[in-house]
Amino acid sequence: MSAIGTSNEKKHARREQRFAVDLAAVLRGGTEDVPVRLRDLSRGGALGTCLSPPPALSNVTLLRGTLAIEARVAWTGRGRFGLEFARPIRATELLVQLSLSRASLA
């Protein structure tokens, strides 16, 4: 598993509340689109899974519906990866994604 950042950065990254989700999305890195599943989501980042995660430290765009979020892959390992969003997403955007996740699980 590759990890980055100091303990202070990790503490800062975890300040946002995380929500368990199960959402289909796409990671766009350069010219390649990779289908992924989001497993948790916060205003500042996400946990995703896929067969072949992008390399740590790569810049990607997370695409889901009308949402497009610039992000950096913070770590990867065993089919999982962590994303750090370039800017926190708005609370309303987060609520929309959470409601869609809850509806798909019902």
Image (tube, rainbow, N blue to C red):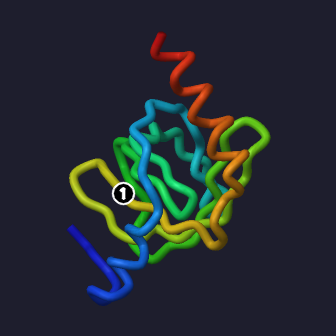
Crowding around mark 1 (Cα neighbors within 10 Å: few <14, some 14 to 19, many 20+) is many
Place of residue 53 in the rendered image (x, y in percent of width and height, measured from the top left): 39, 54
| Quadrant assignment for the N terminus | bottom left
Residue, x 41% and y 47% (percent of image)? 48
Label 1 amino acid?
Phe
Question: Given the current orientation, which residue lies at the most extreme right position?
Answer: 66
Quadrant position of residue 2 = bottom left
On screen, 28 above or below 4?
A: above
Circle 1 SS class = strand
Q: Is residue 8 left or right of residue 95?
A: left
Q: Residue at x 53, y 16 (%)?
A: 104
Examine the image and state in which quarter residue 77 appears: bottom left
Q: Is residue 60 above or below residue 50?
A: below
The residue that mark 1 highlights is: 81
| Residue 15 point in image, percent of width and height | 42, 69
Q: How many marks?
A: 1
Residue drawn at (72%, 46%) of the image: 92
Q: Is residue 11 above or below residue 90?
A: below
Residue 29 is situated, as x and y percent measured from the top left of the image, at 60, 61
